[in-house]
Image (cartoon, rainbow, N blue to C red):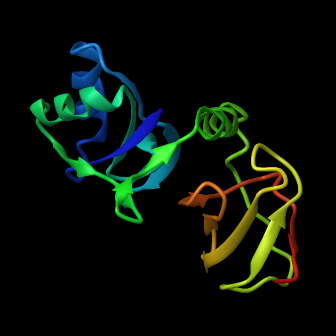
């Protein structure tokens, strides 16, 4: 079982590295973004989910993560520690490996609208469009229970009836 750890801001990489050193299986999905400064553009690697890392461990070993600096708490859902299935971690890994994070084309869809993704790693997933920016979109992936900020080249969204 994978659990979701909430970390201090900008501590995800450091927490993941330290957890690996103490033999705890950890996954911190990273993506590359192009950041613009006044004088240049630069590619940087950033966590896909800010302040979150995934850890796989047994229920009895859950307390061990608190020995690592930067770990704040576990993420809870309905009063219980949030659990992420292996399939969902694989979906995230596949999505990141496809390198389709470039551009999202939304055809007459609006914020708050419920959509089904028709292609890419999140194919057949339902999502709610939380925010549409000039270059990025924030989607709430309903089944995965997470928010993804993305610029996705090959995403073909279609509205669905609720």
Residue 76 position by quadrant: bottom left
Residue 135: give x, y in percent of width and height.
Answer: 63, 67
Residue 68 as seen in the image, left or right of residue 34: left
Between 41 and 149, the residue placed more toward the observer is 149
Q: Is residue 91 left or right of residue 33?
A: right
Up the image or down, 92 lies above or below 79; here it is above
Q: How many marks?
A: 0
Q: Position of residue 149 (x, y in %)?
A: 56, 60
> What x and y, as percent, mark residue 54?
41, 37
Which residue is at the far front?
A: 60
Residue 83 in picture, x, y percent from top left: 47, 45
Q: Is residue 82 left or right of residue 104?
A: left
Examine the rendered structure and indicate whether residue 130 appears above or below residue 43.
below
Q: Nearer the viewer, residue 97 or 40?
A: 97
Q: Quadrant of residue 20?
A: top left
Location of residue 68 by image quarter: top left
Q: Quadrant of the C terminus?
A: bottom right
The answer to whether 61 is drawn above or below residue 9 in the figure is above
Query: In this picture, is 115 found above or below 94?
Result: below
Which residue is at 11% across, 36% downward?
69
Q: Residue at x 67, y 47 (%)?
A: 101
Taking the image as shown, residue 116 lies to the left or right of residue 70, namely right
Between 30 and 24, which is closer to the camera in this rendering?
24
Instruction: State the residue at coordinates (66%, 58%).
Output: 143
- The residue sitting at 40% across, 40% down in the picture is 3
């Amino acid at each position: 079982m994978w659990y979701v750890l909430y970390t201090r801001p900008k501590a995800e990489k450091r927490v993941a590295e330290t957890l690996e050193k103490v033999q705890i299986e950890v996954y911190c999905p990273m993506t590359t973004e192009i950041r613009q400064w006044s004088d240049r553009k630069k590619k940087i690697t950033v966590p896909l989910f800010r302040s979150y890392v995934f850890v796989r461990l047994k229920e009895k070993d859950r307390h061990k993560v608190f020995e690592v600096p930067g770990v704040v708490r576990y993420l809870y859902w309905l009063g219980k520690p949030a659990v992420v299935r292996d399939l969902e971690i694989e979906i995230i890994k596949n999505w990141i490996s496809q390198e389709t994070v470039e551009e999202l084309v939304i055809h007459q869809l609006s914020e708050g609208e419920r959509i089904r993704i028709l292609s890419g790693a999140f194919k057949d997933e339902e999502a709610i469009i939380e925010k549409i920016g000039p270059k990025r979109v924030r989607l709430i992936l309903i089944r995965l229970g997470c928010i993804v900020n993305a610029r996705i080249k090959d995403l073909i969204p279609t509205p669905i009836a609720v």
